[in-house]
Amino acid sequence: MLDSQIEPLKEQQKQATDKAQKESLKTQIASLETQKESVRVLEDSDYIIFYLDEDLDKYKIAHQRYLAKIYLIRLIIILSQMNPVKYLA
């Protein structure tokens, strides 16, 4: 996103004839490049959690439901990998 702002400024800087305008553009470019360095690109394994202004209990309930679903999914996977004949006898 910042790259899309920097490139036009660089083009303007190349085409500028006024020294003050070139210096102003140079300062703007430097500021955007500094901002760009401070922003880390998210990896595929990264995630961001946004919290709403809700009671903590509401989050706890949702988290418990999520963990219960994960537990059930893992249990189903484990049971599906077992030999059913061996355990039914």
Image (cartoon, rainbow, N blue to C red):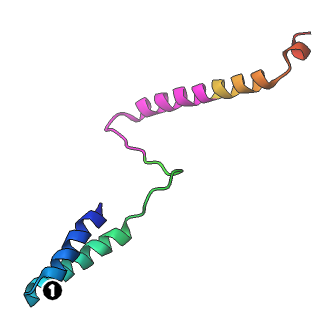
Could you say where residue 52 lies in the image, as x and y percent from the top left?
Answer: 33, 38
Q: Tell me residue 40's x, y (percent).
A: 42, 63
- Determine which quarter of the picture holds residue 12: bottom left
Q: Looking at the image, which residue is at 47% across and 48% down? A: 47
| Image coords of residue 20 (percent x, y) | 9, 87
SS type, badge 1: helix
Quadrant for the C terminus, please.
Answer: top right
Task: Name the side, left or right, on which 63 lies relative to 51.
Answer: right
Side of 74 relative to 89 (left or right): left
Q: Mark 1 points at which residue?
A: 23
Magenta segment range? 49-70
Work out whether residue 34 or residue 72 is closer to the camera in this orientation and state it.
34
- 58 vs 24, nearest the viewer: 24
Query: Mark 1 is on which residue type?
Result: Glu
In magenta stretch: residue 53: yes
* Magenta-colored stretch includes residue 84: no
